[in-house]
Amino acid sequence: MTPRQGRPIGAGRSRSLARGLAVGAALLLAPSAALGAGTGFNLDGKRIDAELRDMVESGRVAGAEVLVWKDGREVHYGNAGLSDLEARRPFTRDTLVQIFSMTKPVTGVALMQLWEQGRFGLDDPLDRYLPQFAKVQVYDASLPDGAPKLRAPSRPITIRDVLRQTAGFTYGDAKHPTDVIWTALQPLSPNHTLAEFAELMPKVPLLYDPGTHWHYSAAVDVQARLVEVLSGQPFDEYVTAHIFAPLGMTQSCWKCSPDKISRLAAIYNTGQDGKLERMARETWLEPNFAGKPMTMGGSGIVTTIDDYMRFARMLLNDGELDGARILQPATVRLISTDQLDPRIGDKDRLWLPSKGSGGFGFDVFVRTRPPQTQQENRGAVGEFFWDGYPSMLFWVDPLNDMAVVFATQKIPFDGTLHHDIRDAIYGAGYTGQ
């Protein structure tokens, strides 16, 4: 395991306590425009709200909202626009959103709970718990007849590989000869269970030897199947019992009740003319309301901005929230530590370097250096975060004792929204330390 990079243990807590003792009740009465003073940036609520309005008025999104928790309390909530343009329904705090890949950190937390219980070791081979993966092969080349030439991997896949996206797995969209195999097998079909997925996934050749490349993939769905095998519970039931319920995340679900659909934000696509086009419900609705058997580890949660903030606050607070201990502090530090071998250079990290100056922990990006250019997203050394396909984003910033959730439903994924909301929160000149 690589040493902790960037986040002094306990530094965020000690700074927060010192500030709280120093300013006391005066801080509780401060306007949002003054919050953040003394931490390297001024958190200006008017600036944040203006950015949200601009996103809507410029036609970049139909609606959006942001929630900022700092120094132990909510310091700003802002919203603009509509969650449903056709119904003229505002984007408000009770709006349900599909978070797609922001599901991944939830899955990672579930698996690490079982690690804390001694159910597995991080460097155990995956096939010890999922024997189907014992005979997985690596794509080596194409034979003259076009068939794939395969070979055994240089070493077994470990659970650490699965957590840090270095197993060599794919999502089937890698512009690689193995894509045709994925397409034929459809491991993540909504009509499959996670158990069926785990039977099909090993039949898709690895793109790379384990540990040699970072490649975004169905690894988190493998994590979800591990949760089922190790706990003896269906994945969604485990998460509901051990994460959602203890944290009071009452609005979060994979297989949601049909009555919630009236609060679900529509997803909008940017058409060729640059205008927002509503996606057909059968296209943008994941298995949540459709009665399909698949419960993905890498996607599928429906939630509200307040519910997901409770998850983010738990991570900010070293694994505990309102008396509910979800993870031990050392486990949160492990999750949010860069786990990538330095020998995995930028060219072997797919698009991960576009996220900022840093690496990858367990299902989260980890910032290890301040922003290197003005074009890079603002953020603090030691922060960790992830995002979701319809341009969702959350981050945890221990240095500034802050967590942020940004919600919108716009595809294709629009990273400029994340750049601009970070600028609005930190200020464009924030140096990140």
Image (cartoon, helix red, strand yellow):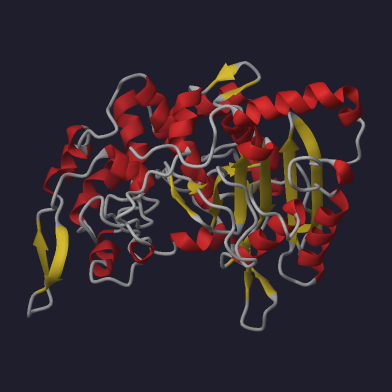
Would you say 112 lies left or right of 365 here? left
Position in image of residue 225 (x %, y %): 33, 37
Q: Nearer the viewer, residue 150 or 202?
A: 150
Q: Is residue 231 above or below residue 368?
A: above
Q: Quadrant of residue 31?
A: top right
Q: Is residue 258 left or right of residue 94?
A: left
Question: In front here: 170 or 315?
Answer: 315
> Can residue 193 be seen in the rendering of this structure?
no
Q: Which residue: 81% across, 49% down?
A: 78
Q: What residue do we see at 25% from left, 35% from top?
A: 123
Q: In the rendered picture of this protein, how many numbered marks are placed on residues? A: 0
Return the x and y of residue 108 as percentages of the image width and height.
43, 37
Which percent across, then down, holds residue 384? 54, 44
Indicate the position of residue 429 as horizontal and vertical percent values: 73, 59
Quadrant housing residue 189: bottom left
View extreme (top): residue: 323
The residue located at (55%, 42%) in the rendering is 382
Residue under the image location 44 percent in, 27 percent down: 238
Left or right, 205 with respect to 243, comes to left
Q: From where the camera sits, is residue 67 visible?
A: yes
- In which quadrant is the N terminus drawn? top left
- The furthest residue to the bottom: 273
